[in-house]
Amino acid sequence: MTLSKVDKHLLFILAENSRLTTATIARQLGLSRTTVQAKIEKLERDGVITGYGVRLSDSFEGDLVKAHVMITLAPKALGRVTTALNAIREVRTVHSVSGTFDLIAIVAADSISALDVIIDAIGGIDGVERTLSSIILSTRISRE
């Protein structure tokens, strides 16, 4: 799907604050409220917008211990490992990657000991051959 410049700007505004009123967004875009509402509905219908969520404060996020967990899979284990990772609530994101590892999971926990338990659980998933973890000390740039 090709998006117009206005649609991309609308998505940027919603990504920054999806709780803005349609009237506020319309003023920012220089469009009518009904036009903006129609654009949002079309983006939802077309699957460009799949939902709205909560963005946590930097102070809350800063209290969490996060890690990248690189995962090597056994052959044909991607489906069951992905399902098992999805069931672990502390697993925030899972990326398929090229190179030595097959997946990188971003994990966030309340403490180092909790993170240790989660990493052990990931290593114990049937189909996970090996993991390598790196604890995130600080975030220098974030555009999320």
Image (cartoon, rainbow, N blue to C red):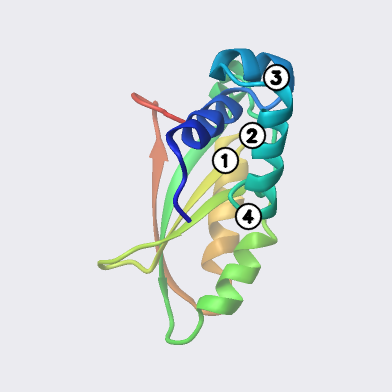
**Is 116 positioned to the left or the right of 39 in the image?**
left
Name the mark nearer the viewer: 2 or 1: 1
Q: Would you say residue 52 is visible in this rendering?
A: no
The numbered mark, 4 or 2, whose residue comes first in the sequence reads 4
Q: Which residue shows up at 44% across the image and 51% down it?
A: 2
Q: Does 135 sit above or below residue 79?
A: above
Name the mark nearer the viewer: 3 or 1: 3
Decide which of 120, 48 is in the foreground and name it: 48
Measure the C-alpha gap from mark 2 to mark 3. 31 Å
Q: Which residue is mark 3?
A: 20
Image quadrant in which you'd find residue 97: bottom left
At mark 2, the secondary structure is loop
Residue 47: give its label.
4
- Coordinates of residue 125 in the picture (x, y in percent): 58, 72
Question: Mark 4 touching mark 2, by CB under 8 A?
Answer: no
Q: Does 78 sit above or below residue 38?
A: below
Decide which of 129, 87 is in the foreground and name it: 87
Q: Does 83 sit above or below residue 132?
A: below
Q: Which residue is mark 1?
A: 108
The numbered mark, 2 or 3, whose residue comes first in the sequence reads 3
Q: Which residue is mark 2?
A: 110
Q: Which residue shows up at 49% across the image and 31% down it?
A: 6
- Coordinates of residue 79 in the picture (x, y in percent): 57, 78
Dot 3: few (<14), some (14–19), or many (≥20) neighbours within 10 Å? few
Q: Would you say residue 137 is visible in this rendering?
A: yes
Which amino acid, mark 3? Leu
